Amino acid sequence: MKAELIVAFGPAVVDNGVVARVVELPDGSGRVETWSPGKGWVKGGASLDEFFLTRPVSPELASRLGIPIESPPLAPA
């Protein structure tokens, strides 16, 4: 059975419309993932310092990008 990842922060718009999140891995470490339409969440693509002064992803933006509802937390509507 595949271990479930815990979203530690995000998804957030980090730079020029790039949507990223930080997930906690089963060993307690973490990694950054970015949203790639058609592929889903992929490893990398942003650095932790890009998460300063970010804005949360709105439900509308998530819908336009195809981010599934099970990828919260999202900004309140």
Image (cartoon, helix red, strand yellow):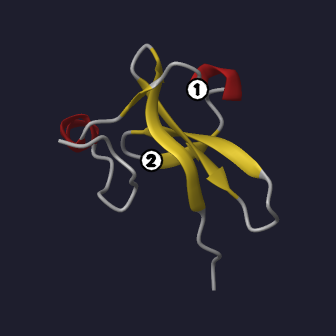
Find the distance from the CA under tag 2 to the CA under tag 1: 22 Å
Circle 2 SS class: loop
Among the two numbered marks 2 and 1 on one chain, the one whose residue lies closer to the N terminus? 2
Where residue 42 sits in the image (x, y, percent)? 57, 45
Q: For residue 32, what is the image quadrant?
A: top right
Circle 1 SS class: helix
Q: Which numbered tag is attached to residue 51?
A: 1
Closer to the camera, 26 or 76?
76
Quadrant for the C terminus in the image = top left
Tags 2 and 1 touching, CB below 8 Å: no
Q: For residue 2, what is the image quadrant?
A: bottom right
Where residue 45 sits in the image (x, y, percent)? 61, 29
Give the left or right position of residue 41, taking residue 62 as reference: right
Residue hosting label 2: 39
Three-letter code, disc 2: Lys
Q: Residue at x 24, y 43 (%)?
A: 76
Give the left or right position of residue 35, taking residue 7 as reference: left
Rendered view: 4 above or below 71? below
Closer to the camera, 37 or 29?
29
